[in-house]
Image (cartoon, rainbow, N blue to C red):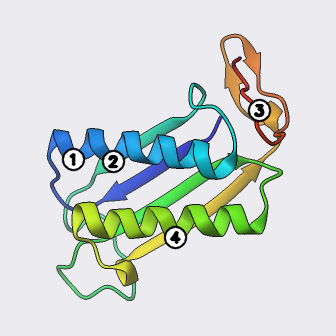
Amino acid sequence: MPHLQFEINKKISDSQKMRFIKFATNKFSEIMKTGTAHIAISLREIGKNNISLGRANEGESVCLMNLDIRKGRSKEQITKLVRTYIDSIQENFGIKISNQYVTITEHSGEDFQLYEGCLKNYKIGDDPLG
C-alpha cells in the first residue's frame, strides 16, 4: 500500500488536485505493475513559508515528495516514477524541476496495514486487494 505524499507551498484548485491524484494513481499502477485500490495519496497545500528547499530562491514554490512503497521495485522503476512525478508537478503546478525533492522509503508488505490485514510482499502484476 504505497503512501504517496506531496507537499506544495502553492495554492492549487480542486480540479488540479483531482487530476493530479488520478494521474499519480494511474502512473504508479502502470510503472510499478500493480493494482490501484491500495494506493494512498496525500496532497497537502502548505503555507508559502512553511516548507523550504535550500536550492530554491526565496519566495519560489517548492514541492517535497515522500513516497512510501513496498520493497521489490527495480531501480529503473523507481527512477521512472520519480521523473514522471517531477515532470508532472512542473507541468501541472508550475513548480520548477530544481525546486522539487523526493524521498523514497521502502517497506516490506507487512508494514502496510488495512482493516483486512497487511499486504503481501510485492510481486510483478500483483493486486494486493484482489
Name the side, left or right, on which 67 lies relative to 14: right
Q: Amino acid at mark 4?
A: Arg
Residue occupying the far top of the picture: 116
Q: Are marks 2 and 3 in contact (CB under 8 Å)?
A: no
Q: Amino acid at mark 2?
A: Phe
Could you give the CA–CA distance between mark 1 and mark 3, rounded to whole angstroms? 29 Å
Tag 4 or tag 3, which sits nearer the N-term? Answer: 4
Query: Residue 126, labelled with which disc?
Result: 3
Q: Are marks 2 and 1 in contact (CB under 8 Å)?
A: yes
Relative vertical location of residue 118 with respect to residue 25 in this rendering, above or below: above
Tag 4 or tag 1, which sits nearer the N-term? Answer: 1
Please give the name of the residue rendered at 77% of the width and 32% of the height, measured from the top-left corner.
126
Q: Amino acid at mark 1?
A: Gln
> Which residue was labeled with disc 2?
20
Could you give the CA–CA distance between mark 2 and mark 1, rounded to whole angstroms? 6 Å
Please give the name of the residue rendered at 62% of the width and 52% of the height, measured from the top-left corner.
31
Q: Are marks 4 and 2 in contact (CB under 8 Å)?
A: no
User: Quarter holding the N terminus?
Assistant: top right
Q: How many marks?
A: 4
Query: Residue 83, labelled with which disc?
Result: 4
> Which residue was labeled with disc 1?
16
80 or 94: which is nearer to us? 80
Name the side, left or right, on which 110 lies relative to 6: right
Could you give the CA–CA distance between mark 4 and mark 2, rounded to whole angstroms? 15 Å
On the question of residue 87 being in view, the answer is: yes
